[in-house]
Amino acid sequence: MAAVSQLGYLGLGVKDVGAWRGYAESLLRLRAVESRKDGDLLLAMDDHHHRFTLHEDDRDDVAYVGWQTESAAEMEAIAARLEAAGVAVSRGSRETAEKRHVAGLIAFDDPDGHAVEVFYGPELVAESAGASESGFVA
């Protein structure tokens, strides 16, 4: 049965991206890998392109959660199970996949209305300078 393999990324809405960047780099020891024109900041901790995206907004809350699966087929099987259970599932656009640095994704809301994504094919980086030797475990 198709399943997610790990927590892949978090999108966080924050009031002050600059303050969060300082906190993430100095205290959490994350690496800022990209600051976008739209104000988003991507933070990495291991061989994945990034694990956190900070979006400037007034919520100071989780914007979305991305769960990784091993293949497009597994992602589609999860989508089919969700749809069979009556959950509205959308396929992520190419633009959204590029922003998340993944090959493809689906999106839906959990029963409490939180945005959830399931993806496959994360962009990996050869150098993970600053990453812990044990890697990321969720």
Image (cartoon, grey):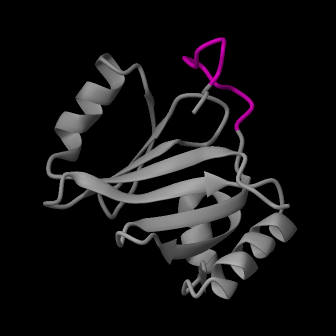
Q: Image height check: is 34 above or below 90?
A: above
127 in the magenta segment: yes
Residue at 30% x, 18% y is 26
Range of the magenta residues?
125-135
Say which of 64 and 40 sits in front: 64
Judged by its main secondary structure, the magenta piece is loop
- Find residue 136 and report its image quarter: top right
Q: Residue furthest front?
A: 85
Q: Quadrant of the C terminus?
A: top right
Residue at 35% x, 69% y is 112
Question: Viewed as shown, does residue 14 lie left or right of 133?
Answer: left
Q: Quadrant of the N terminus?
A: bottom right
Question: Viewed as shown, does residue 101 lie left or right of 54?
Answer: right
Percent of width and height locating residue 125 = 70, 37
Percent of width and height locating residue 37 = 35, 61
86 in the magenta segment: no
Question: Viewed as shown, does residue 67 lie left or right of 29?
Answer: right
Percent of width and height locating residue 22 = 24, 28
Residue at 17% x, 35% y is 19
